[in-house]
Image: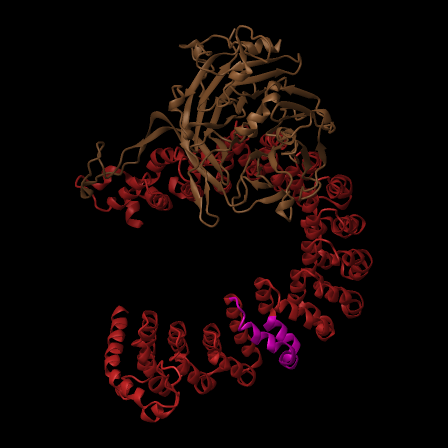
């Protein structure tokens, strides 16, 4: 069974500060995690505007167990803090999202965005160096220009592998509000970027213009009732994208039918249960993430307390609803007071779409097996992740007697939240960002 | 170059003591790796010099291997390299060695930057022509195959452009292979490659045997035209044009039309847009029979498409469609089959559609002739002149000449006027700017009488617009009008009104007078400039606002060439000298600049200028001297000022001499 398999996540690799709360600085907090299409590279972005890329080690005869371990491949500063002088606004350097491009040559490309500006980065390797100058000796001394007797053409010699990250394009000045999503189209030449009220369509090679395809800004801002929270392209149908709203609904648009997609072609909404209606209903129903399954048949949405799977052919209700931390329903009032209720949890599919994963508090994250309907709570922490040991399932006790190994709702640490997780596109390898630490867990090798 | 080529025999040739002619080449080679991109670029652009110095052998054995691995560089360097290599055959030893250039270009053909890749492909295509048939099969075709089966789609996209250059010269066996490879790229996994294949399909079809076109290209075309990706399908429309040119009418009907019909009704507006955008090409390629039976109905659908972008693209083609129809059927087809749809579009909900139509609709009048234009098109023009969207009105007005030829503009003038007035007063300054630019054209077509009566006041009103760009355009407009209507007209209608503004309380309007004078003086000629304009300019030298004063200096410099020596010597120079002592820095600067230009001109006219020191007394008596800035003082009194003027004159004269000397020594 899948859940059993899930329990065997082991061999964690931990990156980040050596642990202690005191060492945690704001800039180191991881703000996005994303595998590339092959899963061999994993990128993280942080609040300090840096992007760190990890590479999976290839099979190695001398170190048979090293297969699959991820090591730092490249680190670069993607965004810097800026100031918008016209609007007197500070623009944070925090990386909101990273999306990889399908690999087109030996180099790798990714898009990274902060609130306003999207950048296309190229990550490439260099392992040769040119040697030999005409006007200099090997040790750098200048030669007498009048005593040059022969011309020397430089020769390429092998050198230690160097990984370079270079900015290739900057897509700026198209968003008035904060960018929350970017998504690459399956046509491999366009991508979308979404902010609170608008979605723009870009060509990857053109930076000086983009097309506005969705605009929900009302003429009078006082009539504003909802904002766009996330948007994503369909994995195969180049004309289809979805966007989610703060009201808990999802709209699917078809770009074939018209150039402006203000009118959706599908509208996914689950009727509200009047019995559970409360002051917090609207806040907790806000969708923080939407992801198509790899097959393109389903999509998954995350709201504050649950994760839902929708069949694209059924708009009236989700086909699955998984409770992530239902025990928090009684604590919404204090979560509202400490602003945690506005946390934006992301969610992800495994490679075969049979399981899903999303984060919670207290460094817990949840996995749901869609076939067996079983679920598990795991913890990302240095203590629980001893090398080659399996992760132990955790349980939160809700009232009554607390069993051994259980943790009470009241002792959950709400500062330790797991908002960003990623699942390898083919293998059972997951990456979990716990504030400033990145945990990579993978299946045991038989 | 000739000297450098002598070094080509190798290092030994230069002799033991060194050769200073090697130095520049040595620098160029070292700078291939300089940290400064500009220097690297410079070296790459002189690659032929380096190669010439190294000689063909070392170029092949050392330089090219080095360049093959230089693909890490900046795009602009790679682009220059790709371009250079296309003309390198002579430098590697001629056609027999052209294949040595393939490795570096092969690498460049896989980089991610499209411009670099395209340039590398262009150079490869160029070099392919220099290969002997044997070398082509031994080196070039294997390269194409390598690219076509490469792991990365950048290399496969590059391959798509290379098939057509090697196919005609390849043997039959290789031809079959090439066709096979092209086929497989047409069904590649990545849309990137399928797009490249689709965009080269037409080109490839042209070099194929007709049988192969029918048996192989057409099925590929059909497949690409029903690809799941919109971006691939829309490229198939383009291919359709090239393929259609190769086939007979009967074949077109059975092999191409089903696919084209499908494209016209494609679910994606982008594909339909492409059909509309390529409509004229399609019409020409398909011929009159298919046009009549199929394309006209298709065009009707495009004109009433649900997507505005498609309707706009189709509306743009209305005129060309008419022009491409056989002469004898034109009128009937347009009248019966197209005009009803055009009438609908005139009141379309989308402004882009309406303005697209407005930009071409006037062109139909030549096709339909006078009667039809008056009866059917004129009501449309009149409606469009009243359209709520200013762009529609502008587009009609800017194309008036087409109608003018057919029915004369008088038919329209009654409706034209309110439309022009409204645009002239539009709240958006860009709209006002646009209509100003059509004024000279309109003036020419409407005639001077109509213009004076109805439009002249508008032109004058723009001179005091609150946006500078409008005032500037308005002054240029006056100049063009004077060129059209002549100096007499200018003297009677324009100049007095412009000059009155010199007394305007707003200094911006006073400056407009100066700008107008700058623009008009040449068109108006010496007499008007000297008698009417110059006095006003001189008078303004005493303006309170420094901006006006330095513009006086600039104006005097500008109109200097039109004036005669007397005016320059007696009137302009003293005023400039006075301004040259102004308390304002800018005024001083521009005055001195003008002084030097004027002095130069005086020298040219009357060399040597001996009497330049004496101001001519009779002129000084005239009341043309700018008055000093004493508020309330009467302009007519000058003696006090004259004294000042005289004493300063020698000083200023020295300055002039110095400036002239300086500018001469610089020459």
Residue B484, percent across and down?
A: 57, 78
Asked if the magenta segment contains residue B449, the reply would be yes
Looking at the colours in the rendered structure, which chain would you say is drawn in red?
B
Looking at the colours in the rendered structure, which chain would you say is drawn in brown?
A
* Residue B81 in the image: above or below residue B424: above
Residue A378, percent across and down?
A: 54, 14
**Left or right: where does residue B119 sit relative to residue B30?**
right
- Whether residue A67 is visible here, answered yes or no, is yes
Query: To which quarter of the image does residue A154 belong?
Result: top left
Query: To which quarter of the image does residue B490 belong?
Result: bottom right
Which residues, given as a range, are shown in magenta? B439-467
* Residue displayed at 46% across by 47% down: A88
Quadrant containing the C terminus of chain B in the rendered view: bottom left
* Residue B418 in the image: above or below residue B317: below
Query: To which quarter of the image does residue B459 belong?
Result: bottom right
Residue B420, percent across and down?
A: 65, 70
- Whether residue A346 is visible here, answered yes or no, is no
Would you say the magenta stretch is mainly helix, strand or loop? helix
Residue A199, percent across and down?
A: 60, 40
């Amino acid at each position: 069974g899948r859940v059993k398999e899930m329990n065997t996540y082991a061999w964690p690799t931990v990156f980040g500060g050596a642990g202690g709360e005191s060492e945690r600085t704001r800039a180191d907090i991881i703000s996005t995690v994303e595998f590339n299409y092959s899963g061999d590279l994993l990128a993280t972005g942080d609040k300090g505007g840096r992007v760190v890329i990890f590479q999976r080690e290839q099979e190695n005869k001398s170190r048979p167990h090293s297969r699959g371990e991820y090591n730092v491949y490249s680190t670069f500063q993607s965004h810097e803090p800026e100031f918008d002088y016209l609007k007197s606004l500070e623009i944070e350097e925090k990386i909101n999202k990273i999306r990889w491009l399908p690999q087109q040559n030996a180099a790798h490309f990714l898009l990274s965005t902060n609130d306003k500006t999207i950048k296309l980065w190229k990550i490439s390797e260099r392992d040769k160096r040119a040697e030999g100058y005409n006007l200099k000796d090997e040790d750098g001394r200048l030669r007498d220009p009048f005593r040059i007797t022969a011309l020397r053409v430089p020769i390429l010699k092998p050198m230690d592998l160097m990984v370079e990250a270079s900015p290739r394009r900057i897509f700026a000045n198209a968003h008035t509000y904060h960018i929350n999503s970017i998504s690459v189209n399956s046509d491999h030449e366009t991508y979308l970027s979404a902010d609170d009220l608008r979605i723009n369509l870009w060509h990857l090679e053109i930076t000086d213009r983009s097309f506005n395809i969705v605009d929900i800004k009302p003429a009078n801002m006082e009539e504003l009732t909802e904002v766009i929270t996330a948007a994503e392209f369909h994995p195969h149908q180049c004309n289809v994208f979805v966007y989610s709203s703060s009201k808990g609904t999802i709209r699917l648009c078809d770009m074939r039918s018209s150039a402006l997609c203000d009118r959706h072609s599908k509208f996914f909404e689950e009727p509200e249960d009047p019995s559970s209606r409360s002051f917090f209903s609207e806040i907790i129903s806000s969708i923080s993430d939407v992801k198509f399954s790899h097959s393109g048949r389903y999509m998954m949405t995350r709201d504050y307390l649950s994760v839902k799977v929708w069949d694209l052919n059924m708009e009236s209700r989700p086909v699955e609803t998984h409770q992530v931390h239902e025990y928090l329903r009684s604590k919404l009032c204090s979560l509202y007071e400490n602003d945690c209720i506005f946390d934006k949890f992301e969610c992800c599919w495994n490679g075969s779409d049979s399981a899903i994963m999303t984060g919670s508090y207290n460094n817990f994250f949840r996995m749901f097996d869609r076939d067996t309907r079983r679920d598990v709570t795991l913890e990302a922490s240095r203590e629980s992740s001893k090398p080659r040991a399996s992760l132990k399932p955790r349980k939160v006790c809700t009232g009554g007697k607390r069993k051994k190994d259980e943790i009470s709702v009241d002792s959950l640490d709400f500062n330790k939240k797991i908002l960003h997780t990623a699942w390898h596109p083919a293998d059972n390898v997951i990456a979990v960002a716990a504030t400033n630490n990145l945990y990579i867990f993978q299946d045991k090798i038989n | 170059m000739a000297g450098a080529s002598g070094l080509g025999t190798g290092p030994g040739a230069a002799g033991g003591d060194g050769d200073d002619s090697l130095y520049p080449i040595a620098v160029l080679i070292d700078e291939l790796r300089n940290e400064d991109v500009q220097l690297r670029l410079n070296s790459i652009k002189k690659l032929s010099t380096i190669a010439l110095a190294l000689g063909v052998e070392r170029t092949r054995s050392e330089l090219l291997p080095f360049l093959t691995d230089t693909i890490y560089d900046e795009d602009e360097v790679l682009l220059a390299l790709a371009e250079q290599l296309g003309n390198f055959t002579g430098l590697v030893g001629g056609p027999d060695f052209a294949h040595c250039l393939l490795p570096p270009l092969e690498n460049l053909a896989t980089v991610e930057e499209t411009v670099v890749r395209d340039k590398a492909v262009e150079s490869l295509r160029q070099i392919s022509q220099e290969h002997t048939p044997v070398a082509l099969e031994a080196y070039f075709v294997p390269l194409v195959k390598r690219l076509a089966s490469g792991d990365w789609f950048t290399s496969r996209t590059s391959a798509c452009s290379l098939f057509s250059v090697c196919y005609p010269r390849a043997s039959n066996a290789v031809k079959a292979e090439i066709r096979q490879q092209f086929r497989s790229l047409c069904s590649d996994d990545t849309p990137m490659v399928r797009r490249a294949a689709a965009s080269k399909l037409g080109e490839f079809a042209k070099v194929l045997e007709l049988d192969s076109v029918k048996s192989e290209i057409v099925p590929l075309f059909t497949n690409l035209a029903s690809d799941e990706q919109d971006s691939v399908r829309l490229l198939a429309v383009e291919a359709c044009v090239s393929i259609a040119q190769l086939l007979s009418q009967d074949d077109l009907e059975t092999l191409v039309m089903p696919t084209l019909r499908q494209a016209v009704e494609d679910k994606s507006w982008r594909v339909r847009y492409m059909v509309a955008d390529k409509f004229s090409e399609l019409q020409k390629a398909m011929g009159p029979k298919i046009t009549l039976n199929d394309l006209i109905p298709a065009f009707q659908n495009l004109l009433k498409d649900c997507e505005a972008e498609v309707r706009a693209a189709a509306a743009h083609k209305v005129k060309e469609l008419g022009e491409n129809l056989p002469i004898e059927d034109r009128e009937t087809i347009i009248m019966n089959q197209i005009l009803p749809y055009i009438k609908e579009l005139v009141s379309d909900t989308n402004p882009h559609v309406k303005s697209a139509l407005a930009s071409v609709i006037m062109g139909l009048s030549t096709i339909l002739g006078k009667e039809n234009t008056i009866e059917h098109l004129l009501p449309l023009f009149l409606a469009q002149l009243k359209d709520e969207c200013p762009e529609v009105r502008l587009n009609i007005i800017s194309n008036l000449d087409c109608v003018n030829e057919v029915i004369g503009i008088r038919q329209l003038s009654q409706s034209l006027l309110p439309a022009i007035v409204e645009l002239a007063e539009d709240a958006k300054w860009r709209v006002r700017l646009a209509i100003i630019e059509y004024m000279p054209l309109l003036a020419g077509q409407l005639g001077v009488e109509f213009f004076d009566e109805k439009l002249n006041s508008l032109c004058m009103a723009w001179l005091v617009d609150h946006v500078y760009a409008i005032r500037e355009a308005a002054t240029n407009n006056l100049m063009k009008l004077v060129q059209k209507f002549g100096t007499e007209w200018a003297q009677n209608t324009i100049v007095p009104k412009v000059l009155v503004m010199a007394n305007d309380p707003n200094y911006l309007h006073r400056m407009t007078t100066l700008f107008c004078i700058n623009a008009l003086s040449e068109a108006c000629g010496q007499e008007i400039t000297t008698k009417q304009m110059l006095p006003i300019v001189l008078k303004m030298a005493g303006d309170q606002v420094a901006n006006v004063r330095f513009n006086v200096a600039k104006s005097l410099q500008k109109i200097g060439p039109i004036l005669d020596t007397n005016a320059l010597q007696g009137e302009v120079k003293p005023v400039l000298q006075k301004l040259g002592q102004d308390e304002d820095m800018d005024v001083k600067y521009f005055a001195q600049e003008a002084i030097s230009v004027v002095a130069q001109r005086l020298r040219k006219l009357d060399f040597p200028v001996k009497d330049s020191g004496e101001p001519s007394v009779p002129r000084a008596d005239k009341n043309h001297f700018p008055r000093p800035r004493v508020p309330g003082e009467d302009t007519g009194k000058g003696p006090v000022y004259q004294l000042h003027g005289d004493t300063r004159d020698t000083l200023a004269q020295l300055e002039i001499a110095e400036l002239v000397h300086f500018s001469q020594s610089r020459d």
